[in-house]
Amino acid sequence: MGYGAMDCALIATGTGIVLSWVYKIPQVIRLAREKKLKAGKVFIEVVKITLVKDVNSLIKGCKGVMSIATACAAAGIVIGVLGFTGLGIRLSGFIVNLSGGHLIVALILTEIALFIMGMGLPTAPAYILVSTLVAPALTRMGVPELAAHLFVFYGACLSSITPPVAMAAYTAAGISGASPIKIGVQSVKLAIVTYR
């Protein structure tokens, strides 16, 4: 249809708000009959309450997106600097040269790069950062592009639980009130199978 992701998100949000109001119409009619009031007055009250809830939901959504948007912006700055200075191409070449043409060594070096560069980033920015810098090294070694990106994405998923900057552990610590380091170590113990 030619719509971009932002357009689709905006249309979906607007449609959700409108449908939430349409969903209230039977409730308004029922309340008006029960209280023997005019449906118009009840509908205005319900719309006021619903509008306040919708605005509060939008505010909560904006606050929730701020941390991810900030991390993505920081990753974009790092990618821009690495691309502008040529370090991204050098890193990719460094991995190919250091591995000596052995794919398993290149994969281990890729995971090390992902561990270092993905530290403190959520999954999406960690993937974006490392996929633009390191995935080309894997494709140069003959790995299919989709497999290289899935490998990098897999490592990006693990970056959120890997100490010392395990963001998921800090989130869980905030919820549970426990030590973030203990939670990070426990999460690595539980996910040790994925590090093979």
Image (tube, grey):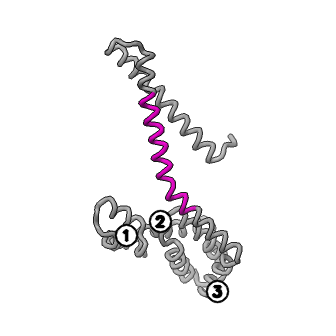
Badge 3 or badge 2: first in the primary sequence: 3
- Range shown magenta: 48-72
- Tag nearer the camera, 3 or 2: 2
The main secondary structure of the magenta stretch is helix
The residue to which callout 2 is attached is 157
* Residues at discs 1 and 2 in contact (Cβ within 8 Å): no
**Residue type (three-letter) at the residue carrying disc 2:** Cys
Callout 3: SS? helix
The residue to which callout 3 is attached is 97
Badge 1 or badge 3: first in the primary sequence: 3
Badge 1 or badge 2: first in the primary sequence: 2
**Residue type (three-letter) at the residue carrying disc 3:** Asn
Residue 195 lies, with reference to residue 173, above or below; the image says: below
Residue 151 lies, with reference to residue 48, above or below; the image says: below
> Which quadrant is home to the N terminus?
top right
In 3D space, how far apart are the residues under numbered discs 1 and 2 (Cα atoms)? 11 Å
Question: x and y percent of residue 164 in the render?
Answer: 41, 75
